[in-house]
Amino acid sequence: MAVRIIAAGDSFITRRLPEKGYEGFEELAGLIRTFDAAFVNLESTFQWHEGTPAATSGGTWAMSPPETLDDIRRFGFNLFNTANNHSGDYSQDGVLATLRHLEERQMVYAGTGRNLTDATRAAMLETPRARVAMIGVTATFAPEAAAGTQGPDVKGRPGLNPLRFKRIHHVNAQHFAMAKELADVTLINAAKELSIANGYTNPFPEGSFTLGNIEFRLTEGPEHVETVPNSRDLARITAEVQEARRQADVVLVSLHAHEMRARKSNEPAEFLETFAHAVIDAGANAVIGHGPHEMRGIELYRGGVIFYSIGNFIFETETVAVQPADAFLNKGFTPETKVGEYMDQRSLNGTRGYVVQENIWRAVLPGFTVDNGRVTEVKLYPVDLGQKLPRSQRGLPRLTRAREPMLYLAELSKSYGTEITVDEEGVGSIGLRN
């Protein structure tokens, strides 16, 4: 039986929705509610001073009142990802508190858990038409935010479902020699060199060299950066996809990742493409990407669809109610600094950063149909988040009839051989090759 799914990206919600909604809310919610499964990424911790601020954050320490979960549900969402670079902003207690508030509301979520098995496990959404499984994964995170494996003697660590990866810098002979010279000058490899001399560590393989934690390989071809997914993480996640395939009619993988190709923030890093192909090969029907706060291209692959990033849905980072002292001290301010003042300084009064980048404030809601294990239809609904509105109102989503966002997405998707047509209402359609 055909199952209709709609997906929304990063929801960094920091304030309650108006009781009667806002202009454009009913139109948007009305669309979302027409689908069987409606997915969204929860880009925050949902707790109120129940967790302890971590030493580092995902950019802004994200803490939203638990009641904002009720506001997100008002749009019609019923499937929620919790694995992203803000999952660990308030340490393990923040993770556990968020889980409690989700479970009190009987929300179907995946991506974080009380241990690694729990965080990896697929969520199951029962719809009248089909059972929909969803696995939440993130490649962007602080190491201490990753969930830990449950052992026979010690319980696992609460946290997120990680996808680690390795960077390899392929460079020519001149730059390879420069890396070695830099190591000699800085003594960054001194401890490693001593360990090699004492026989505890193997020497660097021929044509390979590590400068601190940065790996270089000598190449006679074009210089480039190679990224490779961690084999253990990939095996663990694909095994969960295979199990979900056995138990559900539709399998979705939510992938949160900021990592980009070279300096192009609107293109995914190579390992993300490798990962997306692998999970579809394992049985997933769609990969729903988000994280860079802007759109990336769309790829059709083996009867499935990969949305490398669908952008933001709610983006209210500037109106977060509180920040820990670390946020202010890291910028040279006093602990008594007010959040609004801090945000003014961070953006230089709205002249730099996300607020001036048009692509941050336009996004897409892909609505797609899965029938008999294959994606048979994809519609793309453009969303505007009100870049030009004042801070107090900016960041709420509205459907737009502007064609430019979809034309831009169509251009991004060409490298994957994906053809997107855009109608007069600004809605995109993908020509499927099934």
Image (spheres, rainbow, N blue to C red):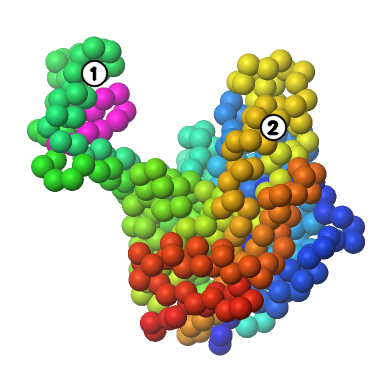
Q: Are the residues at dot 1 and dot 2 in contact (C-beta closer than 8 Å)?
A: no
Q: Quadrant of the N terminus?
A: bottom right
Task: Residue 201: give x, y in percent of width and height.
Answer: 19, 24
Q: Which labelled disc corresponds to residue 182?
A: 1
Query: Does 393 sit above or below residue 19?
Result: above
Q: Quadrant of residue 434?
A: bottom left
- Neighbour class for label 2 at 10 Å: few (<14), some, many (≥20)? few
Element on which disc 2 rests: loop
Which residue is disc 2 drawn over? 349
Look at the image and give the residue range highlighted in magenta. Answer: 209-218
Q: Quadrant of residue 86?
A: top right
Three-letter code for the amino acid on which mark 2 is drawn: Asn
Query: Does 413 sit above or below residue 146?
Result: below
Residue at image point 59% right, 69% down? 403
Three-letter code for the amino acid on which mark 1 is drawn: Leu
Q: In the visual, does 273 lie left or right of 327?
A: left
Residue at image point 28% right, 13% down? 186
Q: In the visual, does 79 lie left or right of 418?
A: right
Task: Residue 82: give x, y in percent of width and height.
Answer: 61, 51
Q: CA distance from mark 1 to mark 2?
A: 39 Å
Query: Does 382 sit above or below residue 193?
Result: below
Q: In the visual, does 234 lie left or right of 316?
A: left
Residue at image point 71% right, 59% down? 397
The one nearer the camera, 424 or 171, is 424
Residue at image point 43% right, 81% down? 432
- Assess whether residue 293 is covered by the magenta stretch: no
Task: Residue 312: give x, y in percent of width and height.
Answer: 61, 54
